[in-house]
Image (cartoon, rainbow, N blue to C red):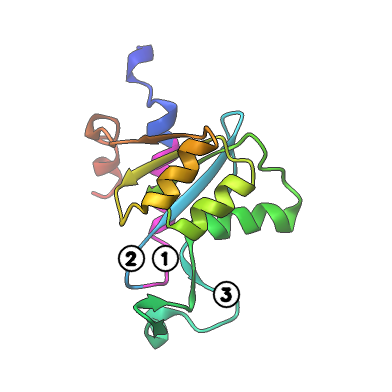
Amino acid sequence: MVDQRIPWNQYFMAQAVLLSLRSTCTRLEVGATLVKDRRIIAGGYNGAVSGDNHCIDHGCYVVDGHCIRTIHAEMNALLQCAKLGISTDGAEIYVTHFPCLHCTKAILQAGIKKIYYLHDYHNDPYAIELIQKLGVEIQQVKLDPKYFEKLTSITK
């Protein structure tokens, strides 16, 4: 029954979706999972700096149409690796939404070699250009419900 096992890209993207449920910004719930050699090395979700007020409690702090209180999920995952001294060179990232330009630049600079994303979200043309120029693979993943049917029995 090998074909019934959840494929790696479905498994890691599901982890990113699960992380997004911890998001504290009400504008968009995003999760990111960093993976190296098929092992999760870090995860992140969008929310305030640790110890600061959260959007869910105090509202978003919006300037020029952007919530400046929030650190993006991708950045939180990368910063977790930096804080703990974990190399991201050659790793892959699974993110629930196409990364913004700033996150794309950080992902590329951190040595990430493949970006998987679930949803298109304001896909920045320059981000796409940078990804292609640097030869980083990018792939949209669609979650297949057949791998998640068992989860419904957990919530009953």
Mark 2 vs 1, N-terminal side: 1
User: Mark 2 falls on what kind of element?
Assistant: loop
Quarter of the image with the N terminus is: top left
The answer to whether any part of residue 98 appears in the image is: no
Marks 2,1: beta carbons within 8 A: yes
Q: Earlier in the sequence, mark 3 or mark 2?
A: 2
**Residue 55 appears at what percent x and percent y?**
41, 80
- The residue that disc 2 covers is 28
Quadrant in the rendering for residue 152: top left
- Which stretch appears magenta? 12-25
Residue under the point 39% across and 25% down: 7
> What residue type is disc 2 on?
Leu
> Eyeballing the image, is 53 above or below 93?
below
Q: In this orientation, does residue 144 appear? A: yes
Mark 3 lies on residue: 49
First along the sequence among labels 3 and 1:
1
The amino acid on which the numbered mark 3 sits, given as a three-letter code, is Val
Of 130 and 63, nearer the camera is: 130
Determine the residue positioned at 41% across, 31% down.
9
Magenta-highlighted stretch: main secondary structure? helix
Q: Which mark is residue 83?
A: none
Residue 83 is left or right of residue 111, and the answer is right
Q: Position of residue 100 (x, y in %)?
A: 42, 57
